[in-house]
Image (cartoon, rainbow, N blue to C red):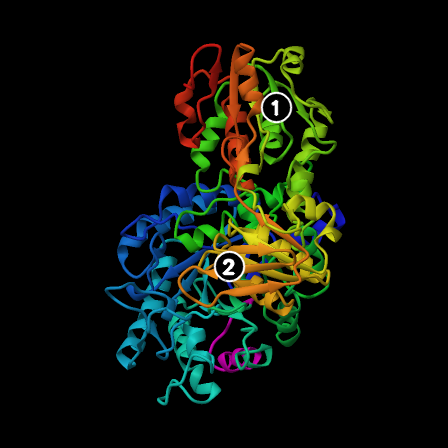
Amino acid sequence: MVIASADAAVLLDPVNLGPARLRNRIFVAPHTTNFGEPGVNLITDRHLAYHGARAKGGAGLIITEGIRVHPTSLRRLGLHAFDDTALPGLTALAETVHAEGSALFAQLLHTGRHSGDDHHGSWGASSTPWTTGATVPHVMNTFDIDTVIAGFAASAERVLAAGFDGMEIHLGHGHLLQQFLSPLTNDRSDGYGGSARSRLRLAREVVMAVTDVVAGRGAVGLRLSADEFLPGGLGPDDVVQAVEWLREDVTIDFLHVSHSAYVGAPSLSTQMADMSYPRAPFRALPARFKAEFPDIPVLAICRIDTLETGSEMIAGGEADLVGFARAHIAEPALTALSLGDGPAPRSCISCNQGCNANLEAVTPITCTVNPKVGMEKAWDAAERSTAQPRRVLVVGAGPAGLEAAVTAVRRGHTVAVVDRRDELGGVLSDLVKMRGRDGFAILTRELSAELRASAAIVRLGTEATPALVAEFAPDCVVLATGAAPDPATRLTLSGSTPVYDTVSVLESPDVVGKHCVIVDDLGTWEASGLAEQLAADGVLVDLVSSTPGFAARVTVYSRLALGSRLGAAGVRVHTLSKLRSSESGALHLEHTIGGPDVSLDNVDSVVHVRPARATTALFDTLQEVGWHGEVHLVGDAFAPRSAQEAVYEGRAVGLSIGVANTTVLAGISARAPYQLGRGTAA
């Protein structure tokens, strides 16, 4: 979205955070990348390229992911500043970001009870694990506390020596300092527990130690969770009071207001709110702190999504700066493209697939809408490569086909797109009808708009046949024909209970009746989202899965809130269960490891969510008729997966067509095409 110049003015005002001068009020919020060097937790070239691109994109400030202040807080592939080995990489990062005009702050962090490993364990205020089944932390003694305070101070000195402009001390998200502050995680009886002032003592001593070291050489602020969203936990009144007490002893240059706690509860899902939440759902929290502390710059964060929303918040006095983490993952040039005259920026859709799901797996982040994330150098090299113009026919206008088409057009190819549907978007056009999954409509809308604005030929409502291929006479065909439920795996029930698939129910929700059983063989959003949708419409829903937990392939950052919503909606979840038998109006479930069997009566319908099969009939037909040419299979037409893989492969194919020097494509993992009429796959 390109916003009006009048709205942009407030975003472009320079601002001071302590001694640091920022060129505008837009910042890249801290977010874990997992780009660190394995085993040593140091800055890599991936960090430099990644943050360099976002600084070049116009952001006024970049705040790094959490930089650990002590080995007990290490995360595999994360970063630290607790010894001098970190200095060269931190210095290179500061130089890279500064060269593009952005300021750079470090986030200094000890994560406490959810850190550590099997050999060293974790440290915490008390012995309570962060979630059921997690390891019990070591209860910190005064020696440990002194060590952590010294670690914050030493890390602050190092990031300043590296050329950083400031830092924020993490006092939120259920990390160590918040673990001491919260009554839910601090049951100590010494001077660091008990009253609210005593529970704040560690944070106070850390902030004082850091400000003593910094001594005006850089900005020092606080990252806060304004609300833990936990019964009996910290709320805005408590955190406001904590800030007031801290200001009695130190000068705080800014407040970065977030929310949540890292716990095995829905609170964690709010930290990185997915598309099931509305835009800027927690904007009242920074507004509260701005009202309480009008003399301190307040930074706002969490699903603000667009600069338009951010400008509203600044103009309305809710914050002084607005931060975008996932939006900058999706579009490094968010600032420049939103406020300039170039193409529209690619929007974050809050799917949490490439970012948060990879965080959970402790693998480098990526992005559904931006395949370049973390591999900027490789993708830039591919984009700079020379491509000989080709005639390209893209069959299928889902995310893979759309991405392939718009990329091929940008590369100078002559492109035609055909699809048997009457609308662009493929199966996503159906799935966006599902409650809480409409974020994918943003992706299809932006891809469709780019395609419509290009010189590509678009023909909808058209079945692709060999005759159609001959009509277009392409040099290569991109098959993005998707996938469909495999008829061979569909449930067969005795009796008269009908069995549907997800798409047919989304098109005609009334067919399910008053009581629907969803049999989930995938563990993705499909079954759980449909269950939530039907329950909201008043249907009694039973969700059956043979896995130990529901929605096994949904990131925990989303699943915790999803489970809470399903429970509130009355959805009954049966895990470790499978269908044993059926009769008219009744289904009998068998527990897979000896638990009690369950009978479900008065069942009106069953929805079977099951693996799909790639739709490749045209590929087979082209082989049979002896068509000669290059064929690419992308997205679900290669193998059924998610929109993330579809966009990635569409972009990779669009870049690879017509490139003679395929060595340059190695970094983007572009599959070699099938050469029909000239042998098998290359």
**Magenta highlight on residue 245:** yes
Q: Residues within 10 Å of mark 1 (few under 14, many from 20)?
A: many
Question: Is 601 part of what is drawn in magenta?
Answer: no
- In the image, residue 231 above or below residue 121: below
Report the quarter where the C terminus lies: top left
Q: Secondary structure under badge 2? A: loop
The mark that comes first in sequence, 1 or 2, is: 1
Residue 269 % position (x, y): 54, 63
**Residue under numbered circle 1:** 394
Please provide percent x and percent y for residue 292. 63, 76
Disc 1 versus disc 2: distance between alpha carbons?
A: 37 Å
Q: In which quadrant of the rendered image does the N terminus lie? A: top right
Residue 371 is labelled as none
Q: Give the camera-side residue of 85 and 440.
A: 440
Q: Which residues are magenta?
A: 239-258
Looking at the image, which residue sits at the far left? 119
Say which of 313 and 596 sits in front.
596
* Image location of residue 463, percent across then percent down: 68, 23
Q: Is residue 219 left or right of residue 139?
A: right
Question: Which mark is drawn over residue 550?
Answer: 2
Q: Nearer the viewer, residue 213 or 416?
A: 416
Where 197 sits versus 404, above or below?
below
Along the line of sight, the residue nearer the viewer: 116 or 254: 116
In the rendered image, is residue 522 in sight? Answer: yes
Type of amino acid under label 2: Phe
Residue in the picture at 65% in, 46% down? 500
Which dot, 1 or 2, sits closer to the camera? Answer: 2
State the image quarter where residue 425 is shown.
top right
Q: Amino acid at mark 1?
A: Val
Report helix, strand or loop for mark 1: strand
